[in-house]
Image (cartoon, rainbow, N blue to C red):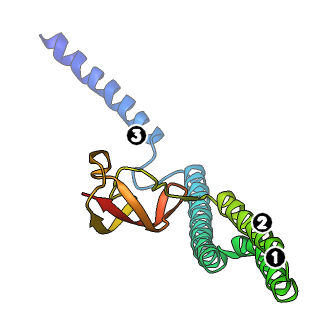
């Protein structure tokens, strides 16, 4: 046992010397190597620049979005205000024809020619309405439908087959692109 105790201090001395060598090689916890500090400082500056760039990009994107929103609101307002412009431009030739027809009525003695002129203008106007999606609601012998017809009055049906059907049309109705813009005012058989 004596031998062991003698060896123990040597081993401890050897261990202590190894430990002291390790301690001398390891830097103190409070001190950071200069290279690592420089690297961290460079990373910090790079991250700060990246954050600044992201802030700028965010502000630009937000400004673009705000400009887009304002522009679309302005375009909607212009569309509402001037939306009928193309429609009105298309109707101007019909008005010109009416003016020429009225002038011809005052100068012409031929009633048949005036009648044909008015029919031509009427057909041109009907074509204009068709081109813009406006269609007449059919009423002749049609079943009464509250989606398209407005009953002005009821009348006893002359035949049992006409019960619940349109007997007469007081005012024509119209749809525009399959949406009712004016209900047909009709007399319904009961």
Label 1: state its secondary structure.
helix
Mark 1 or 2 closer to N-term? 1
Quarter assignment of residue 95: bottom right
Q: Nearer the viewer, mark 3 or mark 2?
A: 2
The foreground one among 7 and 49 is: 49
Using residue 61 as the reference point, say whether residue 1 is left or right of it. left
- Residue picked out by circle 2: 120
Q: Residue furthest bottom?
A: 106
Whole-angstrom CA distance, mark 1 to mark 2, is 9 Å
Label 3: state its secondary structure.
helix
Please state the horizontal and vertical placement of residue 85, each as a whole percent of the image: 71, 76
Quarter assignment of residue 80: bottom right
Label 2: state its secondary structure.
helix
Q: Is residue 80 above or below residue 186?
A: below
Q: For mark 2, does the 10 Å Cα neighbourhood hold few (<14), some (14 to 19), or many (20 or more) residues?
A: some
Please state the horizontal and vertical placement of residue 122, each as a whole percent of the image: 71, 68
Q: Is residue 123 above or below residue 85?
A: above
What residue do we see at 28% from left, 52% from top?
164
Q: Is residue 161 above or below residue 19?
A: below
Q: Are marks 1 and 2 in contact (CB under 8 Å)?
A: yes
Number of dots carrying numbers: 3
Query: The N terminus lies in which quarter of the figure?
Result: top left
- Residue picked out by circle 1: 97
What residue do we see at 60% from left, 50% from top?
35
Mark 3 or 1 closer to N-term? 3
Q: Nearer the viewer, mark 1 or mark 2?
A: 2
Whole-angstrom CA distance, mark 3 to mark 2, is 111 Å
């Amino acid at each position: 046992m004596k031998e062991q105790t003698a060896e123990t201090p040597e081993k401890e001395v050897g261990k202590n010397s190894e430990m002291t060598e390790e301690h001398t090689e390891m830097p103190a916890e409070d001190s950071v190597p200069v290279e690592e500090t420089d690297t961290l400082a460079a990373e910090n500056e790079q991250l700060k620049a990246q954050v600044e760039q992201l802030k700028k990009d965010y502000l630009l994107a937000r400004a673009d979005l705000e400009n887009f929103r304002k522009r679309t609101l302005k375009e909607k307002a212009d569309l509402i205000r001037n939306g009928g412009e193309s429609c009105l431009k298309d109707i101007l030739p019909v008005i010109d024809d009416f003016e020429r027809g009225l002038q011809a009525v005052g100068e012409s003695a031929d009633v048949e020619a005036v009648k044909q002129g008015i029919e031509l203008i009427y057909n041109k106007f009907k074509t204009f309405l068709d081109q813009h999606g406006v269609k007449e609601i059919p009423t002749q012998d049609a079943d009464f439908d509250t989606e398209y017809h407005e009953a002005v009055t009821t009348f006893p049906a002359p035949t049992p087959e006409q019960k619940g059907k349109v007997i007469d049309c007081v005012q024509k109705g119209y749809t525009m692109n399959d949406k009712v813009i004016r209900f047909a005012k009709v007399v319904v058989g009961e």
